[in-house]
Image (spheres, rainbow, N blue to C red):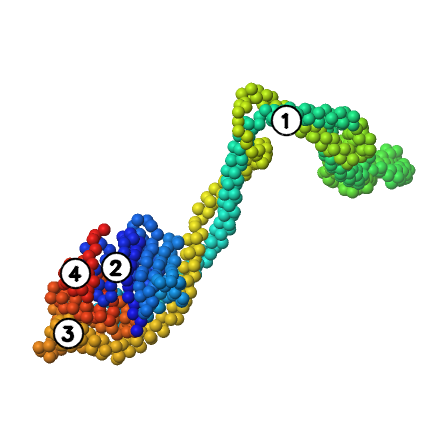
Amino acid sequence: MIVLLIHRMSATFGRLQGPTLELKPGLNIVQAPNEAGKSTWCAFLTAMLYGINSRERDKAGFIAEKNRYAPWSGSSMSGRLDCRSGSDELTLTRTTRRQTAPLAEFQALYAGTGDPVPGLTGQTCGETLLGVSREVFERSAFIRQSGLAITQDAGLERRIASLISSGEEDTSYSEAREALKKQLTRRRYNKNGMIPAVEAELQDMERQLSDLRALESQLAAARQRVEALSAREVSLQDELAACDAWERQSQAQALAEAKSAAEAAEQKISLLRQRLEADRVPEVDTIGRLRGAIVNLETVRKNLEKARTERDEAMKAALRAEAAVSESPFAGQTAEQVRREVASPPDGKPSYTAAAVLAVCGLLAAAALGWGLWSMGPLPALGCAAVVVLASIGGACALSRSARKKARAAALIKRYGTTDTDAIAALADTYYKLCETQEATQADVSAKTATADALYASLSSNEQGILLEVRRFAPSAFDIPAADEALKGAFARRRELSGAETAARETRLRYEVLAQQSPALSEEQSPLTAPARERASVEQDLETVRGELAAARSAADQLSGQLNARGDSVVLSSQAALLTEKRDALNAEYDAIALAMEALDSANTTLQNRFSPALGRRAAEIFARLTDGRYSGVVLDRAFHLSAEAADERIYRDAAFLSAGAADQLYLAVRLAICDLVLPQENCVPIVLDDALTNFDDERCASALRYLKEAAQTRQILLFTCHSREADFFADDADVFVQRLAAN
């Protein structure tokens, strides 16, 4: 038979700040006042065996274990349990590496050798040593104070039925089934379902995580760079201090070296200047001017191309204007000529032949008529002849006017294509505008041609001027690209000289400074090891590192600000993981809840048919012991309805009619009976009672203690109590281990 026996427990857990609780085989009475840590020890034992659920969260009216039992001192949660499992002495320890996972670090060792116990992990410890899950242990072997006195009503029956059917004293089978039904409804894929809500929240959180992880990666790299640069800065500062010490000792020698360096630098400058003069290399200003001129050439060239394009477009416009003028009926005339012509349009040349013939005929007719009437007298003859002549002349004049009008109309149509004077005036106005346009286009062509010619002349002149100057020191430069390359080379040589001059000035200045300091040097200095590098190199590196460090810190601060504004990726990842688990759980639970409801119905039926009679028999035996034989039997029917049989009456009475004290005894008898039936007999799981006898009077308490002592012969029993009567009852009993704890 495997027996689990707890020797001692040491805890940093809630209000417990490292105390050790010694335990013995059999019945252990631990007496301590309220708020002394009794319930904390009970919770600690469960945590050592089964761990703490780090995923549990605080809720309204509920504090998660990881927060409720966080050490008051601020230390990390830890504990040790020394026990015997079968014939093996074991030491179990749990520590906390991360505050988000208290007691997650588990170790099980053989006490004699210190070797790890194979197969025993933090997840399997409790179930391996006790043979039951955490839920079964807490609902059977872990008996807490009820919190409410059991009265003479249906409360006792209701609590026992709930405990047997659902495993929870406060939840009956019907309540459990209704709760499952509600959970099934809540998980449905409807508008207000839990699964769609979780999936939407998860999608949004994954998007946020993607953005955060990118920022975190950048921030991690920036912080690593800051750390590396900070360490480099400290190292360079130390190196610079060593250089200071060395320089103070070797300043005299450094003075000579500085003088030599100054002379060498000046000699280098002299040599460079000689070479520049020999090669006729121009000054920096001249080089800059010529290179600027080369740059301007490209601008002039582009302007020339643009001017030529604009000139060509102007010529095209001029040709179009000239063609439009040539097509006008007024082509070749000036504006003044057109105005005169429009003011007096051309008349047609009339034909006088018909009029002359008519007049002659009239005269001949008059003569004939006069000759015929002469016989009547000269006056009548002359009168008639005169009338004929006048008529002939009138006819001739009328015929002349008609001919002239027709001739004028024909001339207008031939010239302008119309006889409408307004239309002719409109043609004249159009002609005026066409002439003006022609003049403007011709002027634009002239201006743009002059501009293009000027730009071309400027380009050619500037190119020749540049090449002329460059070939003074670079005879092979016959084009602008070659001249530009020659100028670049000349600038590089001038820059070399400038750099040498700067170095020479710095060297000379250093020499002068050292020369001023040399009289104050001490000659009695112990020799030092020469630094690995010169001070200038260290200072340069330090300056560079400080600049890079400032930039890196600024970048890290910016990234940190962005990251803080977006939230904590660890929290979001944890939330996303929880949401994923929640979604998967909901999907699985939705299919499982219906099956669970069926299983609950089947289990309830099974409990009613099988478990109730056995539980009733065992509870009757314990109830008889607890009541000193006043009650001889207990009946628990299939509906978990309780009846108790008084020994002197031999009649079963409803448990609702029991006294409050008898109801407490019956409740304890049922709980102990459940332990006997549920817990594996081969493991002898320890039983923990946390103020379970608080509501018992002295007589009932004594009966319960006697039974517990007897039951402790086969298993370890831990009774935590705030009263002294339990400890006083076993004060002289060597078989019961009694200890009294002081208040913290």
User: From the viewer's perspective, is residue 522 above or below residue 155?
Assistant: above
Q: Give whichever of 30, 592 is nearer the camera.
A: 30
**Is tag 2's residue or tag 4's residue first in the polypeptide sequence?**
2
| Residue named by callout 3 | 624
At label 3, the amino acid type is Ala
**Separation of marks 4 and 3 at Cα, in angstroms:** 24 Å
Q: Helix, strand or loop at disc 3? A: helix
Q: Is residue 524 left or right of residue 484?
A: left
At label 4, the amino acid type is Ala
Q: Is residue 548 left or right of residue 444?
A: left
**Which mark is drawn over residue 727?**
4
| Residue named by callout 1 | 257
User: From the viewer's perspective, is residue 609 above or below residue 140?
Assistant: below
Tag in front: 1 or 3 = 1
Tag in front: 4 or 1 = 1
**Is tag 4's residue or tag 3's residue first in the polypeptide sequence?**
3
- The image quadrant of residue 705 is bottom left
Outermost left residue: 648
Residue under the point 27% across and 56% down: 20
- The image quadrant of residue 1 is bottom left
Q: Give whichever of 726, 175 is nearer the camera.
A: 726
At label 2, the amino acid type is Glu
User: From the viewer's perspective, is residue 618 above or below residue 105?
Assistant: below
Q: Helix, strand or loop at disc 4? A: helix
